[in-house]
Amino acid sequence: MRSREAIRHVVAYIEDNLKNDMTLEEISRIAGYSMYHFHRIFQSYAKESVSEYIRKRRLTSAASEILHTDANIVDIALAYRFESHESFTRAFKKMFRVAPGAFRKSNRRLHIREKQRLTDKRLQYLDGGMAAEPRIVVKDEFTVVGLACSTTLSENKAPALWEAFLPRVGEVKNRVSPHLMMGVSEFSLNHGSEAFTYMACVPVISVEDLPESMAARTIPKREYVVVTHKGKLDSLGNAFDHIYGSWLPKSGYDLVEGDDFEIYDERFLGPDHEESQVDIYIPVQKIKD
């Protein structure tokens, strides 16, 4: 569609000019829309203004330079069009919850607070990959039984784990529902590079006679942001990107140290089905004033 193509061109232009001055007039001209219309088109996809998107992308790129180069932080701040070291530090701390100098010393990438680029794949996802807007729910304590493995997103072992678990799911006693399965991911600050435990499992009413090599895990009562992913499983990561990159920074909520999980029920029609739906639960808490 024309609007998505326009945003794709604008995003490419923004990436090429993060260290240059950009105006809304110029960006709207590249998109082929009036400023009035383009602002609303962009906001409908990104859930934030063009200027907010540019600022967060500049901060994300600046953070990468702080972490991976020896360049002076003041020089990095000015290169990314911040007026002063003070204004850069304020903006950086607001986005990453840490000062630039402390971030460099920690030598730890804060992936969950980065602003990911609006890729064409993600634009397609935002154009129809969510069955509903994210919502806040409180879920009571529950227990699951299943198979677990240690994995990372870069070397994803979850599909193989599901292949091993599905033929054995009937061995689990006291299931809550024969149509309900879950994938539980142990909390990690950076699933992209750090190993974490993943469980292919089912919720149970009580635990008894655990099947061989299976484990039980109890998840405490928590508050969650829930997003319903619609489409093939290979685009599931876009739902997490939307929560972390678009929803979280302006939600008034913050992440908490807790497991996130996916729920597969009657709406899940298979990993390659365009109409499949999966609910993703990410633990959060309201930010105190």
Image: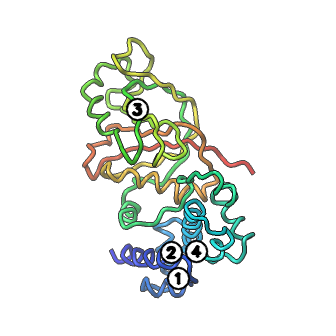
The percent position of residue 50, horizontal first and vertical second, equals 54, 74
Foreground residue among 216 and 170: 216
Which mark sits nearer the N-terminus, 4 or 3? 4
- Of labels 3 and 1, earlier in sequence is 1
Q: Report how far apart the C-alphas of labels 4 and 1 lie in the structure.
A: 14 Å
Seen from the viewer's position, the closer of residues 68 and 252 is 68
Q: Residue at x 58, y 67 (%)?
A: 62
Q: Which mark is residue 187?
A: none
CB-based contact (under 8 Å), mark 4 and mark 3:
no
Identify which residue is drawn at 55% across, 61% down. 68
> What residue is shown with label 3?
199
Closer to viewer: mark 3 or mark 1? 3
Q: Amino acid at mark 4?
A: Ser
Disc assigned to residue 40: 2
**Marks 4/3: CA–CA distance:** 40 Å
**Secondary structure of the residue carrying numbered label 1:** helix
Q: CA distance from mark 1 to mark 2?
A: 7 Å
| Rendered location of residue 199, percent (x, y) | 40, 32
Number of callouts in the render? 4
Marks 4 and 1 in Cβ contact (< 8 Å): no
Give the Cα distance between marks 4 and 2.
13 Å
Real-space Cα separation, disc 3 to disc 2, in angstroms: 41 Å
Three-letter amino acid code at disc 2? Arg
In this figure, which residue is indicated by the disc labeled 1? 36
Q: Which residue is mark 4?
A: 51
**Label 3 amino acid?**
Met
Rendered location of residue 94, percent (x, y)? 68, 60
